Amino acid sequence: MRVDLQPLEVTAHTAGLDFSTTMLPFGSGAIYAHTQNTPCRMWRSPEMLRDGSDDIYLFTTLRGNGILRTPHESYDVPCGSYGLVSKARVHEFITPRGGASACIQVPHAALARRVPGLEEAPLVLLPPSMPEPALALGYAQMLASSSSLSTSVLQSALLHLQDLMATMLAPAARGARPEPETLNVPRLALIQRDIRARITQPGLNLVQIARMHHLTPRQVQRLFAGEGTCFSDFVCQVRLERARAMLIDPAQRHRRVLAIALDNGFDGASAFSRAFRRHFGVSPSEVRGLNG
């Protein structure tokens, strides 16, 4: 991470520093990191600047407040705040009570190609109303929690994250809004993740999902339309995939097909069988038989 770590205070009643971080490399020198720590100081010292790193990182405090200091200024960083800081700048980040944080780090050159006149060592605390920081870090966190990702997926994700960070650094230079795909791809991915996570909830609907993501139902439908589908079709697909997993699960062999259909939001066995055959090309009973 190219920072010095120091506990804030060590006494006979404290165990020193406990610092745990998980990283996902995106390639091309970019990483996502999620960190949990006891009270500490993360310091980018003048001596450390000799390593030549000029990476810029987008950070947020997930739990606990922080203090960001440079040789000339000090900023309070409330929990949930976002900022962009360059490692070409002497600075320190202090967590007085410990906590958790996340960041995306990319080389300066990758952002300089997108932001004409980007200064050598930016430091920007971002307004709470800006949607891009939460979208970028939420997207990166989703990727980090995925069990396996292809190189092409990581490369595509990195391009979207770089575009989002460039927009945060110079929104006016990009018309105050990124190109549509810059927001749409990660935003749709996060919506799809939340649908999967809530697929068993009886109240799952378009209005609920739109409200969660601070969008209108029409905006959500447009995101799905860009992928050639719609909200209801995607929900049906997820329910069918879940039903198929239940049908081939040996622990659920004793359950009737109708019970599995009802568990996944279908009104009856007939409607479930028709939708299942359209999607998978075989009937629920055939899937169960092939895996029996």
Image (tube, grey):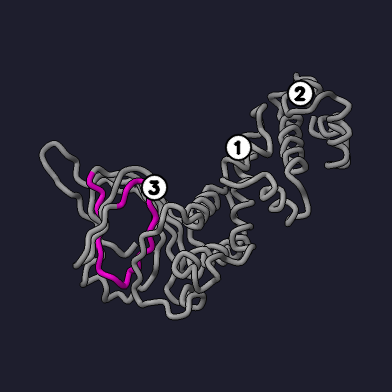
Q: Which of the pair 70/288 is nearer the observer?
A: 70
Residue ID for mark 2: 262
Q: Is residue 5 left or right of residue 198?
A: left
Which label's residue is closer to the chain start, 2 or 1?
1
Q: Is residue 285 positioned above or below 123 on the image?
A: above
- Rendered-image quadrant of the N terminus: bottom left
Residue ID for mark 1: 197
Outermost left residue: 12
Q: Position of residue 121 (x, y in %)?
A: 34, 73
**Quarter holding residue 209:** top right
Q: Residue at x 41, y 51 (%)?
A: 34
Q: Residue at x 55, y 70 (%)?
A: 175
Residue 78: say if magenta.
yes
Label 3 sits on what residue type?
Gly
Per the image, label 2 sits on a secondary structure element best described as helix
Disc 3 and disc 1 in contact, CB within 8 angstroms: no
How crowded is the residue under tag 3: few (<14 C-alpha within 10 Å), some, or many (20+)? some
**Residue bounds of the magenta highlight:** 77-96
Q: Position of residue 39 (x, y in %)?
A: 23, 46
Residue ID for mark 3: 80
Per the image, label 1 sits on a secondary structure element best described as helix
Q: Is residue 263 positioned above or below 123 on the image?
A: above
Q: Residue at x 25, y 70 (%)?
A: 48
Q: Is residue 140 positioned above or below 88 on the image?
A: above
Q: Which of the pair 93/243 is nearer the observer?
A: 93
Mark in front: 3 vs 2: 3
